[in-house]
């Protein structure tokens, strides 16, 4: 009985700190070495009020398809953020596929905070959230197998 009560208190404390931060990690999937996937954690970003795409970057023809084929709109960026998982900066930098094609922009959250983001054609990206305790998330979206991402459809 005491263990259950203590566990309940710990969960309440975690939930309170999660709500205070407005950003939460829910659960993690262990690394899958057989399929070359890093450990991935669910991330609950604060609700977004507005996203802008400010720039498209790329070296043109990098491979087939070329960077000109990576032109996501606002709906695809929202979809990316709703499906993306948080990965370590180490995994993001060294274990995932990098391509030079990416879009970047800004975000305003419903709580008034602002941020910046970028998303690459290989379905990786980052989001930086401003505030008293700024935070950066390194993201990977293995479920983004839809156009215009290059993971395949």
Image (cartoon, rainbow, N blue to C red):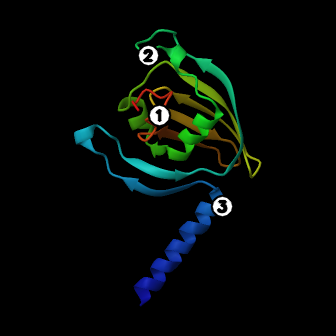
Please state the horizontal and vertical placement of residue 54, each as a whole percent of the image: 69, 25
Query: Which residue is the site of mark 2?
Result: 65
At x 44% / y 43%, what residue is drawn?
Answer: 87
Neighbour tally class for label 2: few under 14, some 14-19, many 20 plus, Cα within 10 Å: few
In the rendered structure, which disc, 3 or 1, sits on the residue that comes first in sequence? 3
The quadrant the N terminus occupies is bottom left
Image coordinates of residue 111 in percent, x first then y, are 75, 52
Left or right, 92 with respect to 20, comes to left
Extreme-bottom residue of the structure: 1
Across and down, in percent, residue 30 comes to 32, 51
User: What residue occupies the far right of the structure in this picture?
Assistant: 112
Which mark sits nearer the N-terminus, 1 or 2? 2
For label 3, the SS is helix
**13 in relation to 23, above or below:** below
**Dot 1 corresponds to which residue?**
146
Q: Secondary structure at mark 2?
A: loop
Residue that appears at 35% across and 41% down? 38
């Amino acid at each position: 009985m005491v263990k259950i009560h203590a566990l309940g208190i710990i969960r309440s404390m975690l939930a309170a700190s999660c709500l205070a931060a407005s950003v939460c990690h829910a659960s993690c999937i262990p690394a899958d070495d057989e399929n070359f996937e890093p450990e991935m954690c669910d991330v609950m970003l604060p609700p977004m009020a507005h996203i802008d795409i400010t720039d498209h970057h790329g070296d043109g023809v990098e491979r087939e398809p070329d960077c000109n084929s990576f032109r996501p709109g606002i709906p695809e960026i929202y979809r990316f953020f709703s499906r993306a998982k948080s990965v370590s900066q180490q995994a993001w930098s060294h274990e995932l596929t990098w391509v030079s094609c990416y879009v970047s922009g800004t975000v305003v959250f419903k709580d008034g905070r602002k941020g910046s983001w970028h998303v690459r054609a290989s379905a990786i990206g980052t989001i930086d959230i401003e505030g008293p305790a700024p935070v950066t998330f390194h993201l990977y979206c293995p479920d983004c197998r839809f156009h215009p991402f290059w993971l395949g459809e």
